[in-house]
Amino acid sequence: MFKNFKIPLISLRVRIFLSMVVLIIATSLLLITISIFQYKSVAKEYNQKRIENMEHYVKKHINYMLSNTTYPLTDENIKLIFKDKIHEISDIQNTEIQIYSLDGKLLKSSKESFSIATQSPIISKFILRLVNSSIDKRFVEVKTVNGIKYRSSYSLIKNKKFKPTAILKLPDIPDDGYYEKELNNFLIHLAQVYALMIVMAFGLAYILSSFITKPIYDFAEKLRETSLNQKNEKIPFSAKIKEINMLLLAYNRMIEELERNTIKLAQNERDLAWREMAKQVAHEIKNPLTPMRLTIQSFQRKFNPEDPNIKQKLNDFSESLIQQIDTMSAVASAFSDFASMPAQQNEVLNVVEVIELTLDIFHEDYIVFECAEKEIISKIDRT
């Protein structure tokens, strides 16, 4: 299934853009997470401080009453001492107050309807151990009811001699939702700000990725246009990135080396062309020499001063030599002028006459020329 799966090629611009986008989103999520954690930590610290302050002021009132009473500080006397005053303290601090004995039995409560009987609530031995074993002799119990978090504070009440007398409980104090509301408002504003920032960051990421990769695209275009058959231009060092400038430097060095090799190649091609031209010139000069030699040998062999057509034959012989000499002169002139071989010079001629004149060179018995027409006019090159 996965054998034929291939990861698609992604351009460098897209890679940079996606990397920056992922980095921005990851950073945003990290900052939001840290902000939420920080706000929750502050909210927790605030609620702890609030209940500590409440407990401090309640105990301050209680200690004041205990220090000014004339009753011995027994469980029964504590009920009498706080018979009415506990309601005043509860109203002042706006919280319910409960006072327990050291063994966890309820002595007095600010709740009017509360009936002190055998069913009265007690403090569990576990919480008593936590209160007595803690450094500051207090314990805060946290519980959640119907999605609302409540805190109950337990702390020792001491007399003037710092001897434990009773246990103060501030029951079921709801957490203040101020910081939760602030957190929600903060998250809403933060989401709006980050949405704007992410949009701006996407645009900036696209611009930066284009800026970084543009020199590479330009270099690729120049490299595509590089050819041996033309003069290649160097790329100026316009990029602000060191690695890309190193790439451009290597390209410019390659262009210089390419130009040098092109010059050498052109020189080699010229040398080869000269050699081919020399061979061709030698061949073109050698071609007329053979007919000239044969013509002279034939004329020398068949020369007869008493022949009545001697003047005509001498005239034909001279014209043949002149034609071959003209051909050699044309080849020499072309070579001296660094030109190509002589261009074809067409003229209107009698083909029969030209062939008969050419056959005067060859007198072998097996060479026979027959023509039914005396004239065949054509536009050809005599040479």
Image: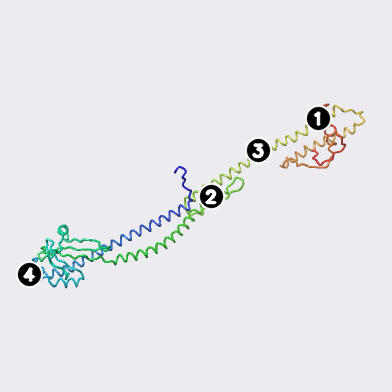
Residue 373 in picture, x, y percent from top left: 87, 36
Position of residue 265 measured from the top left corner of the image (x, y, whole percent):
61, 41
Identify the element where label 3 is drawn: helix
Amino acid type at circle 2 is Ala
Frontmost of labels 3 and 4 is 4
Residue labelled with disc 2: 220
Residue 43 in the image: x percent, y percent?
Answer: 28, 63
Which sits earlier in the primary sequence, circle 3 or circle 4? 4
N-terminal of the two: label 3 or label 1?
Answer: 3
Front-lying residue, 84 or 272: 84
Does dot 4 land on a helix, a strand or a loop? loop
Image spot of residue 192 (x, y percent): 39, 64
Q: Residues at badges 4 and 1 in contact (C-beta under 8 Å)?
A: no
> Which sits in the foreground, 143 or 215?
143
Assess whether mark 3 and mark 2 are in contact (beta carbons under 8 angstroms).
no
- The quarter of the picture where the C terminus appears is top right
Residue at 62% in and 46% down:
229
* Residue type (three-letter) at the residue carrying disc 3: Leu
Q: Which mark is residue 294?
A: 1
Q: Which mark is residue 272?
A: 3
What is the number of the mark on residue 71?
Answer: 4
